[in-house]
Structure formats: structure tokens, C-alpha cells
Amino acid sequence: MRVARAFESEVESLFIENAQLYQLASYSFAREISLSGRQTRSLSEASISQQLKLAAHAVQRRIEALARIAEVPFSHRIVRDEPVPALARACSERGPWNVVALAEPFSPANAQELRHLFEEVTGTTGLVIVGPSARRTTGPVVAVVEDLDHVEPMLRAAERLATITTAVGRAMAEPVTLVVVGEDRSARDWLEGQVRLMIARRDDVRLSLPEETRGVADVIAEEIRRLGAGFVVSQFGGHVVPAGGDLRHLAIALECPLFLMR
Amino acid sequence: MFFKTKKEPVPLAPEKPATSIAAPAGSRVTAASAIIARPDPLSVGELRRIVDPATLGFKTTDELEPISGLIGQDRALKAIQFGANMKSHDFNMFVLGPPASGKSTAVKAYLERKAREAPPTPDLVYVDNFEAPNKPKALTLPHGRARAFAKGMVAAIDELRNTLPAIFESDDYQVRRRAIDEEFRSGQEEAFEALSKRAQAQNIAVLRTPTGFAMAPVHEGKVVKPEVFNSLPETMRKDVEAKIEVLQKELELILERVPKSDKQRRQRLAALNDEVAKIVVREALDDVAAAFADVPGVTDYLNGAGADLVRNAGLFLPQGEEDGAAIKPSADTERDARFRRYMVNVFVENGSATGRSGAPILEEPNPTYANLIGRIEHIAQMGTLVTDFLLMRPGAFHKANGGYLLLDARKLLLSPFAWEALKRTIKQREIRIEQPAEASLMMSTQSLDPEPVPLDVKVILIGSREIYYLLAANDPDFQGLFKVQADFDDSIARSSENDRAYARLIASIVKEHKLRPVEAPAVARIIEEGARLADDREKLSIEIGRIADIVREADYWAGEAKRATVTRQDVTRAIEEGVQRADRMRDRAQETIKRRIVLLDVTGAKVGQINGLSVLQLGNFSFGRPTRISARVRLGNGRVTDIEREVDLGGPLHSKGVLILSGFLAGRFGQDMPIAMAASLVFEQSYGGVDGDSASSTELYALLSALADVPIRQGIAVTGSVNQWGEVQAIGGVNEKIEGFFDVCSAREEFRTFHRGLDGEQGVMIPRANVQHLMLREDIVAAVAEKKFSIWAVESIDRGIETLTGVKAGERGSDGRYPAGTINRLVEDRLRTFADKARAFAQKPGGDTDKAATS
């Protein structure tokens, strides 16, 4: 909701009833294991349907309430399909400027799924995800810059997001920090120079150049934590969030939401 | 039927200037023939004891050394000394005496000297009991160190507000924490991932349902349709089902391990937090621990506080990330609700910090329950009243602990629960802050049970004698807890030595209030007023407050007259102005007599009628007022009817006086005949209550006059009580009574309506025993000197009736009879006549004296 407000957008809630669950329920041996692992019960189409219906209504009520508070236009849809195709279809219907916010936190094990999402769901600008350590929504917005093309859109997105990460009572908006990353030292120095030219005379943007003593992903994850970021903007498929790569360091260090740009 | 005496009124004694009774016009010759000369009145010297200023030995009080302490109160001062020195908890003091007699001043003056010599008393603080928060702990610290202890704790918490967040943000901590998180998280995730991979390898998918997980056979990433699956050979189907069952079991185990693993993770994190916080907390408390290492109890408290701080280190970390949801922490540690439990409630401070030294002396002006033993305040929070140890307030017992507590007994007794709380505290020898039961019943609130403090206080109650005797009679605990009684006298004996001490007392009042010096004649006048206030010319009142008022008012009048010193004239004016300010009611009473609204004769003579005197007390002012008393007699059964009593206007003492005079009549005249008389006595035009026996002799004179049919001189007012043998006894307020009658008589001189004023025939007859109390106004003394007014003193009814009637009372002769023509003979004859008639009447069929008297 806060992101939608920042970007002056509307929110569409898409509840996907996984169609495979209905097929699963048709098996006579199908059993559901509770989240605690202590209970198992047989499944039926009716029970799955009922569960999904209740869950959908609960989600709708919750998001509707948040939208009302955030004064963001809201709509809700329930589709029975497989998750990624359903999301791809919904995004393609609404043009390419969608931002998808995933309800469940990502884990290092989801790296492939993230890649799959980016590949399949083309009608998006990016994804907003949270990690398992998320606990903060205020603080500076940190944009991880890995190439020149992304600097400007990242800066614009970061400026928008800074309006929602400023703690109540602060007179000034949170600053934007650009963390510059390069493949090697010379690439980073070149990129740094370009970025400095772009942000010249801008007091509200800071630059951070962490020393890459360890692997890039590790160093950047630590830098994000050190800066106490309220929101991180990064590009998907770079050094920090490699497509299908190891997300372990990021998952540990990321204490705030992450806007993954295409 | 009405029986009327045929006896004629007795003739009055022949007129004799100044010493005989003038016969009123129209009086008839009677059987009375034993005329007696009027007794001599009291001399001027007996009416007022004056002080010769020359004997005082100074010109103004400037020459005098002000007196320190009290005069003539040796007994009370010794008692105070004894009480203050006795160490036992039950030797508390009750200082009793009249108001404004300097009791409090004297007690405080002595105690201050003694308290200065005592070692300073320790400070008292209350701190949180971390094990049982509703039972705050009391800590005793050496005097003057409580504030430093409280500041030390604030400084420690201030330090922790910086150091604890810093240590938890440090790289060292974060790395260790993440390592733990990672250890557990990766363990679970890896197990789940491994399971997923194994399942995937067997073409089985783990699917997420809204409330759990489920497994199904898949082909190319999609769940196999049931109809396709069912078309597979049975062995294959069974194989898939078996695989799924195995995987499900594994998944169950993995999921079951999650809470346990999470618990272990939390424990590891808690241990890490404790380890990190402990170091910082110990460092923060080091300074205060070192500074108070010598104080018993402080180390234990700091250990408890340290453990609690480690447990609650989270309080010091930034709270709530949601915008607007977090309550912004206060910059002031003392005001921050999160840290209240680590603050120190400085209950009592002693020593140089307070500018006091030695033992405390506390006078509690408002000894309510809460002000005595302390109270627990509450604050409203979300509609509930809550409290903590910082809302505890000390009582007088806490503040006076180790010293002396002075309390006004009357105020104490008037405060609900206060007296019982005081006794309980002294008995238990500890100060326990409790809510009064009744108060706590009114509302259900969170409350505290603070640790009691050992009591070491000497309690000094100050009050009147009435309160002392009331408590002694009605409270069985009182004598046991207040074993020392310091009894202050109302007055001191009059002597030249005490007169001089009195002058020094006046000098100390002058000094204390920074007044003009008082001249010797003025001091003499104040001493005379002191005797008047004592109601005894042989005594001097030591009502210091009243004397100080006179001196201060005299100083005011001296200032008005632009005099540098206070003269006798100023003192007299101060006294007169004081009377004038208060005498509106006296003026009204005298006006009713002047205007003949209240009937009162001050000339001539009347049978069965006499002027009695009463005293009215209105606030601090009292004045005398004459009242006509009349008696009527008739045939009856010996009963004297007190009309006041019959209508419930007479008090018990008045009724007693009437019964005594009945006893006198029966004893003197009823030896050989029944008293077949009925009499009625009344205070004419009296519409309020009458009490006291000071009019009993007056009533007896009226009765004797009525029986003897001999008139009484109306110019003489009478006061005095009588016993059954006819002896006249002392009464109170003799000066006011004489002055009251004098004012009425002299006022009539002003009006000249019914009377020509003071003509030498007016005066007052008082008991001989009251002569020593006479301190009459100077104008009355002057009138007596000019023989315009007289004061007679008598010791018996016989002498009194002679003075009033001019007829001899008479004594029984050897024949057992009184001489003819005497009052007693006339009375006896009248009573005999009544007896004869009653006997004759009773012999008639249906005769009844009472019926006869009322028919």
C-alpha cells in the first residue's frame, strides 16, 4: 500500500487459487499436513475450495482495510489457475508498469522461483519482496547501482520511496544513498564518475562506495544493513541479486523491503 | 381551697444612713423585730490587687533581660525533660494545659536543644523490589546520601540508554546473532529443500495449501490428473503412494522440529543478549556500587537491579518500527515510564542537604491518617488507577523518625483513622504504609505493600486537659503508650519575684515581636490584667497568647498616639477596646434591662424576690448579667419546685443546688415537724438554659424571704452556692458578675427613668471565699471608694439574710426555739402553721394537702 501511495498507483489484489490443489484433492490418498506437522487430514475438493475461499476473503478484507487507510484505489480478483501464468496474465492485461508485491517472504531457496517470475511475468517493472529478517520500514532508501542505465530510474524510484520511509516526526525526507558496485575496481570507478556527474548539486543524494574485500553480494548486503535502510532498490540479475544465484547473504542482511527492478 | 397566711409582712429596720436598710414606702409593720445593723462592706484594698510600678525596679522593658522559656512551669518542664530522655518506645508525652500557655513553644525549645546534640538520623529511600514489584523495599542510607544514590541510579540508566543500543548494534553482536539465526534457519530450510528435491526426483511435488502442505505425483512440473494416474498399473500406483507416504512422514518430522528448533534459537539468542547486556550493565552500575559499597542492602539491591536490567535490556532498544506507533522515548530518564522501576524514591533526607542537623523535630499541623503514616498515590491510566513505589509519599512518622513528632491531640482525634493508626504504629514499632480499609473499599485499585520501616520516634501530643482525661478514661491503650504527662499550669502564684518574672516575659514578647518598649506602669497594668485573667488576685495567668495580644495591641495604640514607648494608658485602651469589640451581646442584654423589657429592681425591697447573677461566655468574652429570681410558698408536701428543671431549662448542677437548699430547710426546720410547704423557684424572664449552683444561696434567700414574709433589698445582687448546713461557698466568675450588676445600676443613672443611679444602696453580696479572687475594674473600685457601690462578703446564709433584710437570722436558744422576730423564727413559725394546717386538713375526710394547694 505504501509503495502504491508513493507511486500514486492503484492496488489490485490477485488471489490465485492454485488449480493443481483441486487435482491433488481428487486423489484418495491425498493428505494435508498441518504447518505444525502434528496433524494430518484427508483432502477433498470441497474442503480445498472452502479453505481457499476463506483465505481469499480474509486477504481481501485485510488489503481493503489497508487501502482505505492509505487512501489508495483498490480492486480484488480471485482466479483459479497456476500461480505464475495467472500473475503473468494479470500483468499483461494492465500494461507494463506493474509492480508486483509478493505476500510471502522470500528465502534463499526461492532463487529459482524469482528468476522464473521475472522471466514469465513480463508485464512488470519489478517486484517488491521482503526477506525473513525484515523488521524495518523507516530509514534511508538505498539503491544499489550496477550499471549506468539503471541509475536514473532507480533514483526516481528511490525518491518516491523516500516519501514513505521517513519516520513520523522527521522534518526532512530520508536521504537516498546510492551504493555503487562494479565488476572490478576500474568498472566501479568509471561508474562512480558517471553517477557523480548525474547527481551533481544534489544534496539529497549520497554516495557509498564499499570496499569489496569479500564477495560483492556479501559486502553489499552488509553495507545495506550498516546503513539501516528503510527500503532497498536493486536490479534483478546483477551482482547483488543474481538470476537464480545465491541469495543467502541478502536474505540475512535485508531488514527492510526490497524493490527488485527488471 | 386556698389557704392564706394571716401574718402581716415584717417591718423593716429603721433607716440608718449607710449601714441600715431603708424601709420602702408603704411597707407594713410585721412581726419581725430583731433588727440588725448592716455589716460593713469590703474595703477598697480588698477589691483589686494593684501593682506599684516603683516596686518593679525599671523604667521600661528595654532594661530587662528577656526571659527564655517559661515561668512557673517547673513541674511540666521536668516532665518534658524526663519524657525526652526516656528511650523506651512507650514513654511518649502528652503535654496538657490551657490554650496559648506556651506549651508548644516550651516543648520545642527544649527538644531543639536536645536534638542538636543527637547524631544525625539516616536517610530513607524506597526502591523497586524486582522479585515482587508490589512490595517496594526500604533502604536506609547514611544521612545526606539518599539524593546522591538516586542521582547515581539515574546516571547509570542514562549511560545504559546509550551503551545498550550501541552494543546491540555493534558488528560483533550482529555477527553472532546472525550466525545463530542462520544456523537454525539454514538447518530447517536445508531439510525442507532436501525433502523437496528428493520428492521432485521421484516426480512428487510438495504443494502449499492454505493451512498446510500436501504431496501429489507430478509430471513435467504439473500434478498428474487423477484419471491419468488411475490408468497406471496398480503396482506403479502403489509405489507412488508408498513414496508419498514416506515423504509425508519426513515432512511431518521436519515441521514438528520447527517449534523446538525455534525455541532453541530463542534460547541461544537470549543467552547471547544476556551475555552482551551483562557487561554493559555491570559497567554502568559500577560507579554507584563503589560509592555505596559501605551501605548495607545497597549491594543486594544493585545486584537485583542489574539482573533485572539484563533481563529487560530490550527496554533500552529503539521501540516499534511502524510510523506513529512508537511512543517516543523521553529525553529525561526520570520521566521515562520504561525506566521508573530503576529510579529511587527519596523518602526522607536528613543532614546538611536539608540545612538541618541532629535529630528531626517535626510538628505536623494536619495530622490526617495519610499525613501521619504516608500514602500511596495513584494515577489514572486507561481508565484504571495504577501506582508504583515512586508514587509513595512519606508521612510525619517517616520524616520524624529518629527524632520527635509533635501533634495537636484534638486535630489528631478529629481525623478519621488517625488515632488508631498512631497507636498501631507506636505499638508495632514500625511505620507501615497502608490504605485505610474504608478508603480501599471505595474503589478497587492496584496497590502496594511497602516494606515497613522500624520506628524510633518520640511522639508528643499537645492538648487540653479535657482531652487528656477523656483519653485516659476511655482508651485503654492511652496510658500505656503515653506514660509521661507534662501538665502546664494555667497560672502562677502572685509574688514580687513572679511579678518581676512576668515583666521579663513581657520584655521577651516585646523583643520577639519587635514592639516599642513598655513602661513600668504599663507593665504593672498588664500584670494586674494577668491576675484578672487568672480570676484570682493571688495568681497570674500564664496565658502567653492573650498577654502577647494585649502587649501588641497596646503597641498599636501607642503608635497611633505617636508615642515611643507603651504607656499604662495604651494598655488600658487595648484592654477596653478588646472588650468593646466583643461586647455587643452584653450591650444588648443591658439595654433590655434599661428599657424595662427585662424587669429588674435595683431599689426598694420585695418579699420573695432577689437579684441573682449569672455569667455568659461568648467566645473569649464573658460578662455578668443580673436576673430576677422569685420564690412563692404555699401549703404542700415539702417539695421545692425548680421551674427551670420542670421545663428542661435547668441543668443538673442547678437542680442539685435546689435539692441542697431543700435539704438545708428540712435539716434546720424539719426536726420536729413535717415540712408541709410547697415552694416554686424561677429565674424570671430566662428563656435559655440555666446551669451551675452559684445561684443556690440566692434562691434560698428568696425562699426564706417568702417564708418569713420579710422583704429583701433589691439594690443588692447575690451570688454564691450553699451547702446543707447553710454555709456559703465560692463560685466562679465573681468579677464578671459584680461588674455586670454594677453596669446595670450605673447605666440606670444615665437613663434616670426609673432610678436615680448609684446612690450607695447598690452592691453585690459574694461568698467570703471569693474575696481572694477579686480583681475588679478600676471604675468599680472608684465607685466603692466614693461609697456609691458596695461589696459584701458572707460566709453563711444567716449572715447573708441579715445583710439582705436587716433582720437578725437568730440562733436556737436553750429552749430549742429561735428568738422572736428573727428570720429563722418567722420561717419556723410559718412552717409550723403549714404543718398544723396540713395535719388539720388531713384529718378531714378526703383531705390531701397537694389537692388543697392546687384547688
Image: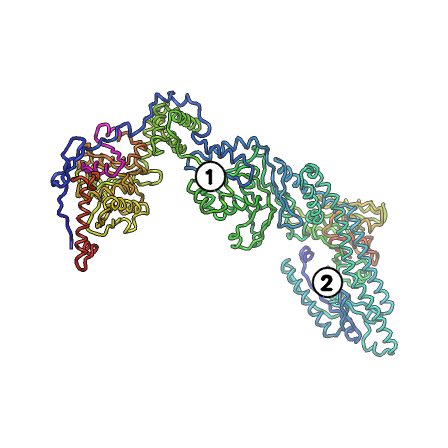
Percent of width and height locating residue B709 = 17, 43
Per the rendering, the mark at residue B774 is: none
Closer to the camera in the image, B248 or B600: B600
Task: Confirm whether circles 2 and 1 share one chain.
Answer: no
| Range of residues picked out in magenta | B781-808
Q: Which is nearer the eye, B132 or B332?
A: B132
Q: Secondary structure at mark 2?
A: loop
Indicate yes or no whether the magenta region holds residue B276: no
Element at badge 1? strand
* Chain under disc 1: B
Q: Chain of mark 2?
A: A
- Rendered image: mark on residue B462: 1
Numbered badge on residue A95: 2
Q: Is residue B785 a member of the stretch shown in magenta? A: yes
* Count of marks, rendered view: 2
Q: How is the image coloured?
A: rainbow
Does residue B399 appear anywhere in the picture? no
- Residue type, numbered disc 2: Gly
Q: For this view, does B246 lie left or right of residue A233?
A: right
Q: Quadrant of the N terminus of chain A?
A: bottom right
- Residue B673 falls left or right of residue B537: left
Quadrant of residue B692 in the image? top left
Spatial CA distance of label 2 from label 1 is: 94 Å
